[in-house]
Image: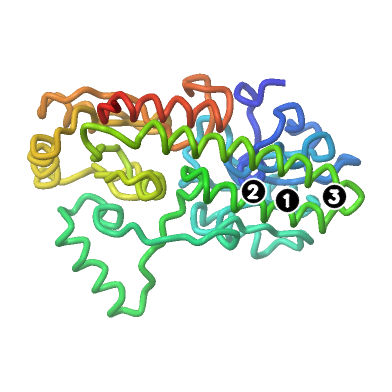
Amino acid sequence: MNVRRRRISGIAVTAATALGLGTLSACSSDSSAAGNTDKFDVVASFYPMEYLAEQIGGDHVNVTTLTEPGQEPHDLELSAKQTAQMGEADAVLYLKSLQPAVDEAIAQSDVKTKIDAATLTKLEDHGNVEHDHGHGGEEHADEHAEEEHAEGGEHPLDPHVWLDPVKYAEIAEGVAKSFEKADPDHAADYRKNADALAKKLGGLDTAYKDGLKNTATKVFFTNHAAFGYLAERYGLTQEAINGLDPESEPSPARIKELQQEAKADGVTTVFYETLVSDKTAKTLAKDAGLKTDVLDPLEGITDKSKGEDYVGVMEANLKALETALGAK
């Protein structure tokens, strides 16, 4: 069954994403919802979790996901059915802080095994424009950060950790250990699948290192600030038109700033993504004489995705970056 064409409940997608690098056939539709099968039932919050659950779980898991293909995961709201479904699962896999509705439902759920991907690696604060949400440049963001700290609020950590293959592999290892503990009868298979996945992610890391080692510029522009971990891993600089919120609108001052930076840093391309409007990216590109291309934050796989799964889309992202940055 092609997971990209099926309408899957929101909660299942998130959990599935959290878990989900595995085989697509392991993914269930609503007819075999979490808790109704004789397999290890996993609810994943969105695609990256779903992929892990499927890759590691293989034939032993039934994965449902809470975020439907093509749905923007940040805005997910859960139905009563999805919440109930989650309560019947053997495990739920999610990334805390990415989807508030999921966090709330999981906190109230009595699922035995709750796997928070955010605890399996170190999340970082990528600051600046990402927290700015369109009010201006870094100066405003710094003021905003100071205000937050003064009010005792936390500076939000960047949740887009799956876009760094090394950190994603750390999460995969934690998920594998949780599966082994929760379903010991199949622990050996989970370990074998996790090792195969680690090898795959290691290959992806090597490809990125080699492909981006020698480039004409290190700066790239994106629609929203999803690529902070990837940029940090491979020595690049991400400049986001919007903040961590993909729907926010940048200020005219921010647009002007980006136009000037494009000239100064030899930026050729403004990247947009498949799940949100490309209008702002195309306007900036036109005004600044730049090209546009897709850099996929892999929050969901759809028919527009340039790849069948996580690894395929990450490989397409690498090609797009190599072209935009002038890889030699």
**Mark 2, residue position:** 172
Given contact means CB atoms under 8 Å apart, are the residues at marks 2 and 1 in contact? Answer: yes
At x 75%, y 56%, the residue is 178
**Mark 1, residue position:** 176
Who comes first in sequence, dot 3 or dot 2? 2
At x 76%, y 32%, the residue is 26
Crowding around mark 3 (Cα neighbors within 10 Å: few <14, some 14 to 19, many 20+) is some
Crowding around mark 2 (Cα neighbors within 10 Å: few <14, some 14 to 19, many 20+) is many
At x 82%, y 58%, the residue is 181
Residue 88, image x and y in percent? Answer: 80, 51
Q: Is residue 121 visible?
A: yes
Picture quadrant where residue 113 is located: bottom right
User: Cα distance, mark 3 to mark 2?
Assistant: 14 Å
Q: How many marks?
A: 3
Q: Is residue 245 visible?
A: no
Q: For the residue labelled by badge 2, is the local secondary structure a helix, a strand or a loop?
A: helix
Q: For the residue labelled by badge 3, is the local secondary structure a helix, a strand or a loop?
A: helix
In the rendered image of this protein, does residue 151 appear above or below residue 230?
below
User: Cα distance, mark 2 to mark 1?
Assistant: 6 Å
Crowding around mark 1 (Cα neighbors within 10 Å: few <14, some 14 to 19, many 20+) is many
Residue 189, image x and y in percent? Answer: 83, 42
At x 83%, y 34%, the residue is 59
**Mark 3, residue position:** 187
Residue 166, image x and y in percent? Answer: 52, 48
Asked if residue 145 lies left or right of residue 183, the reply is left
Q: Quadrant of the N terminus?
A: top right
Q: Quadrant of the C terminus?
A: top left
**Amino acid at dot 3:** Ala
